[in-house]
Amino acid sequence: MPSEGIKDVVIIGAGLAGLCAAKALRAAGKSVTVVEARDRVGGRTLSESLGNDTIDLGAQWIGPDQKRIAKLAEELGVKTFPQFHAGKKLFEDHRGINALDDFVKAISLLSQIELKFLVDRLDKFGDTVPLDSPYAAPRALEWDAQSVESWKLRHARTSGARMFVDAVTRMVFAAEPQEISFLYFLFYLRSGKGFEALSEIQNGAQQDRFVGGAQQLSTKLAEPLGDDLVLSNPVRGIKQTRDGVEVRTDWGTHEGRYAVVAVPPALACRIEYDPPMPPNRDQLTQRMPMGSVIKCIAAYDKPFWRDKGLSGETFSLDGPIVATFDDSPDDASQGALVGFFVGKESRKWTGADAADRREAVLDHFARMFGEEARTPKAYVDKDWPAEEFSRGCYEGFMPPGVMTAYGEALREPVERIHWAGTETALEHTGYMDGAIESGERAAKEILDRM
């Protein structure tokens, strides 16, 4: 049911972005209503019990440079632990499966040298892209006219270097290299502190996990809201008047002086706006698709691969699972493997029969780790492209031509409507840390206006 009275701000979306906006506004003495389409908080974080542990079916990792989420976790009393990565990694290509100390050793020495050169070049290019206005970079038009794929084919000569660019692109964006603007790719590299920081575990974006799962951050943020949090209320329309906003849901209308829309652009464009959005804002949201990923987790009595000297990390060129990680709890009270269908592999399997997908995943795990992996004590997966109120994961991205044509509209408020969500962040875009930044920024924009 609609919350009573006209609030200072109505927030659409109860993920980290929306809840952090609410936290900042309430701390400044403002009243809020948070309206969420799902029957839960957390957005693209989702933690569930599997076996005798809590696992993450959505976002789960935190890196050492992600200061906002580290601070929030400390405030909320949520502890972290290191992602396990000791031991050999398994790499699969047409030659078979090889155990390696480092994935880069799967390619020739010449490819390694070229890859190092390309990574340095990419990071230097990224340093020229302004985080608050990437469309104003000196070579913005040139870079935005290319995809990551077309740049790679032109500048990477060895098959090994090309393969690594593909691998990192797929795992970071859950999309294919030909789908992503090279300018947006460079912006993302700078936002995430560089190529290696985005792709590594140690000192990288996958360094640590949350004890008890990442969704509890949102659950704890939501507790003080009480009746000002309204679940199972998809927002269908937002009407702006001279004095405020009227947010229409299936169950009634919520009124406020301002609104924060804290959902991905691909979902924001499904809301009916009165008056309509400015053309550039509307065109932008039509052009920012979500990544495609299905996350799969199998639980075992123990992490048996560790006894074989394996880290649980794999990368496969044959699929269907592109990569895996050890997903066991910190005390190793059970074993767990997490695998990812990403990009084109996700599109093959989204919406498929759940039993068929489970069989394909366990076949893959058994091929990589042995027959013991075929019979877990529990299994679950999350088909994010099929999720009604996500329509994909990890984040929305920009294909070629979008940033320079419409990028200025990404964060620009439209009258009384302000925008949040990890896609709008300047630092750690696409990550939980970016979601927090975006919510705090949207709250500050409104407080400055007030």
Image: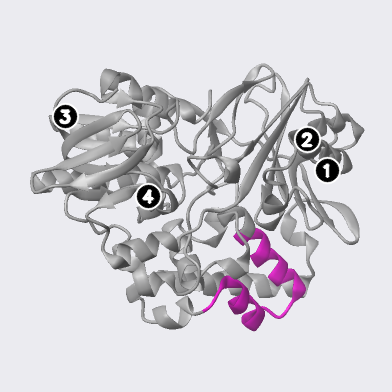
Q: Establish if 81 lies above or below 405.
A: above
Residue that numbered label 4 is attached to: 268
Task: Estimate the spatial distance between the alpha carbons at disc 3 and disc 1, rounded to whole Å.
Answer: 51 Å
Label located before the other in sequence (3 or 4): 3
Q: Earlier in the sequence, mark 4 or mark 2?
A: 4
Q: Residues within 10 Å of mark 1 (few under 14, many from 20)?
A: many
Return the x and y of residue 152 as percentages of the image width and height.
63, 76
Q: Earlier in the sequence, mark 1 or mark 2?
A: 2
Q: Which residues are magenta?
A: 146-169
The label shown at residue 31 is 3
Circle 2 crowding by C-alpha within 10 Å: few under 14, some 14–19, many from 20:
some
Q: CA distance from mark 3 to mark 4?
A: 23 Å
Give the number of the disc on residue 364: 1
- Residue 358: give its label: 2
Q: Secondary structure at mark 3?
A: loop
User: Between residues 267 and 305, which one lies in front from this camera angle?
Assistant: 267
Task: Give amino acid for label 2.
Answer: Arg
Instruction: Residue 440 in the image: state x and y as whole percent.
Output: 27, 42
* Contact, mark 3 vs mark 1 (Cβ under 8 Å): no
Q: Amino acid at mark 1?
A: His
* Element marked by disc 2: helix
Q: Residue at x 74, y 77 (%)?
A: 158
Secondary structure, mark 1, is: helix
Whether residue 91 sits left or right of residue 331 in the image: it is right
